[in-house]
Image (tube, coloured by chain):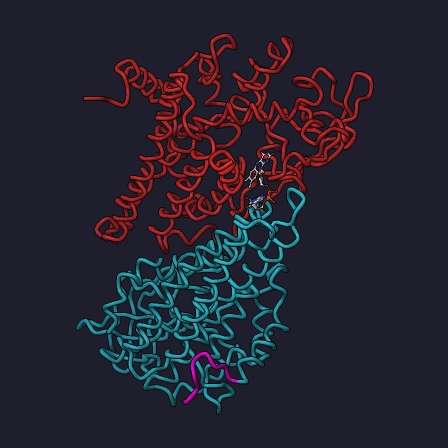
Amino acid sequence: MSDLIFVPREEHGLLADTLNRLLPEPSSAPKDRNALWADLAQSGALAVGLSEDEGGLNDARAVGVVAEQLGRHGAVSPFVGSSAVVARLLAKSSSADSSAGLRARLGDGSTVATVALLPDQPLAVVRTGDKYKLDGARRLVPFGAEADYVLVDGTSSDGAHVLALVPKAAFRIERAVIGIDGCPYADIVFSDSVIGGELVLGMGVDAERLWAWCGDAYLAALCADAVGAMATLVQMTGDYLRVRQQFGAPLSSYQVLQHRFVDMDMALTESRTVAEWAAGLLDADHDRERRQAVITAHFIVMRSATKISQDSVQLHGGIGMAQETPVGRYFKRLLTLPLLFGDEDRPAATYGNAD
Amino acid sequence: MATLFSPEEEAFRAEVRSFISEKLPGDLRDRMLSGGRPTREDKVVWTRILHERGWGGYSWPKEFGGPGFTPVQRYIFEDEAWQAGAPEVVPFGMKMVAPVIMKFGTAAQKAYFLPRIASLEDYWCQGYSEPGSGSDLASLKTRAVRDGSHYIVNGQKIWTTEAHDADWIFCLVRTSTTARKQDGISFLLVDMKTPGITVRPIITFDGYHEINETWFENVRVPVENLVGQEGQGWTCAKYLLEKERLNFGGMGFCKRELARLKRLAAEGAVAERRPLDNPLFKARLNALEMRIHATDLTNLRFLRAEQRGEALGLPAPYLKVLSSHLQQDVLELQMRMLGPDALPVSLAGGSNETLDAISEYANVAPNYCNYRKTTIYAGSNEIQRNIAAKSLLG
Ligand SMILES: Cc1cc2nc3c(=O)[nH]c(=O)nc-3n(C[C@H](O)[C@H](O)[C@H](O)COP(=O)(O)OP(=O)(O)OC[C@H]3O[C@@H](n4cnc5c(N)ncnc54)[C@H](O)[C@@H]3O)c2cc1C
């Protein structure tokens, strides 16, 4: 596609407007998750990452637009795992033809998929005939207890990567928790879990490459989500500084607060730049280019998120600490990034090695 | 060679240490050393233990029933107590209202209130802030109108820490609207059981109940509960700030949480990820530890000056700003170090009660959230810098 990064397509604006109208006000209490999901499905937002034939825009940048709106409105949903990663992965993998039905269901929201992002526990995959057997565990899978499929990266007996999409009938929920970020997570266990060969999306080097793409796609969407959440915090803080009076003058008249606020907006601006850049390169032919962009986005967004979330609370004063004030909800939402993917030290350490 | 502490002070430290290790209940200590927050009962239990030893008002001079510690002894006492896992005493009583009563109170007030504070018979809270008056405290509007032998109080306080646990509240109230706004303020002690007081919880975004709205509707307060003269409340409040400028618990907290951070890094599943072998994490940890040292020692240096009777620098704003950031930073590094292990805070469908059932890690992210308060309360850091700048630059 010959689209230019930083030049939005017309569809991007329309999509953002639609979601902006559809989603609850950023300051209102979060909507019931099922109702929200149904709304998203109806708006077509869950399918934007799919091809034009499948009702989408075949455009990672459009996925970023949706993620940003979700972040901006504080909407809790499995969009990133299901639409931004698994649905698009299916289109990239060798089983692209056979997975058309599943992609359609992910696109219309009737099926939900997620990604087991933390591959820090053993997960053995053994081939038996035309089936595969999985044994092991994955922890803190986002929306793990609600998803119909979970994407996992396991290891075959000869040490090769295996990328598999496991239906929920084949795993067990060990523990379901709520994260500080307001998202549900589940620890899941596979024991003698048998899946059909069509659900193995990649093997060996192929699986490794696809899995790396999945991580980057997740991270890029999370960065876009964070940009949305940060935009809301900047907006709310600016509004508050203009109305709150102390010492007979609005807080916005105090220079030290003006500078703090400008720094917040500057951080947001830079974050948007790198988030858009990363989304634009997500489907680049060269993995290296994509990696560099995503790692940079992770670094810059992480720093901005810390600054903006902390300063938003600070500049609100006592009221910023109250649960009733929406600021805290966005503050906590912005913790997904460091807790799941690491803080800025991680990208700072890996930046040069991106191959 | 020079030393930080004299042999006598070291002996005092040893005495405090052995007292605490003997008397502090083990389960309470373990909860405090694993990031737990003390309950009202915890504080009562611990204060009573201190009280038996004559340390109930440990920051007080002998004439008011305290042990008469030197400033450095107080520092040592708190340093030991924090690191050993003792819960903090209720600051609103011992450290805030008590010194004001000692300085401005009547003989009857001293005789009645001070012993009850030392034994934690009375649990105090602080009623200064109002919805419209935070940083600009002197603009407060809660009215106290004289009616014979009583004041009738109407208005609203907010962010009142532990009002739901408290027996008494000390309030700044407006007794005159004609004077300069600072001069129309009075310092009033109010029994929380008085009819007309309503306490409504404010849940903070970490999910806990520690602060409140406190409403006053025609609350009748006996005139003998006025501290100092009518209109002298601002003087009392300023004196309180000066009294409290040193020796607040912040650095003890930092050292305790730094120790927890190191323990968490070296234990269990987290240790398998070898955070201590990660040079970036190690550098962050070392930097934090050195900063904690520097501020802790700065505190000590200020105390040495105080002990010599010298005024040195700007202890109040500097220690507040430095210590509040360190408290936040140590909790932030705990959370970042745990990474995914810090995510779960409750069981799905469960309540906060299930937090501890998950793991010791479940309080780390909420504590990080909660401690955003330290740069806001007790005079926000911006206000502290305003005060310092005015003093430095005129
Ligand atoms: C957890 C918690 C517990 C508390 N407990 C108590 C308690 O027990 N009793 C009690 O009385 N109060 C308590 N407080 C209230 C606390 O003292 C106030 O929140 C604080 O004084 C700030 O006031 P505010 O919240 O109205 O914020 P504001 O004064 O509205 O300030 C908002 C922001 O503007 C900044 N600002 C304001 N004026 C200026 C200026 N002139 N120049 C530069 N920056 C400025 C502030 O620093 C802050 O960042 C508590 C607060 C918290 C968060």
Residue B145 visible here: yes
| A27 lies left or right of B364 | right
Whole-percent x and y of residue A124?
25, 68
Q: Which chain is rendered cyan in the image?
A: A
- Dividing the picture into quadrants, the one containing residue A299 is bottom left
Main secondary-structure element of the magenta-colored stretch: loop
Task: Give the quarter of the figure containing the N terminus of chain B.
Answer: top left
Is residue A8 one of those drawn in magenta? Answer: yes
Residue A6 placement (x, y as % from top left) = 45, 78
Relative height, residue B143 to residue B134 (above, below): above
What residue do we see at 62% from left, 59% from top?
A: A29
Residue A93 picture quarter: bottom left
Kindly identify the residue that appears in the image at 43 percent across and 12 percent down. Answer: B68
Residue lying at 45% horizontally and 88% vertically, measured from the top left: A51
Q: Which residues are magenta?
A: A1-9
Q: Colour of chain B?
A: red
Q: Is residue A261 left or right of residue B221?
A: left
- Judging depth in this view, the residue of A192 and B341 nearest the camera is B341
Q: Residue furthest bottom?
A: A53
Left or right: B186 with respect to B80?
Answer: right
**Vertical arrangement, residue A335 with respect to residue A298, above or below:** above
Res B360 seen here: no
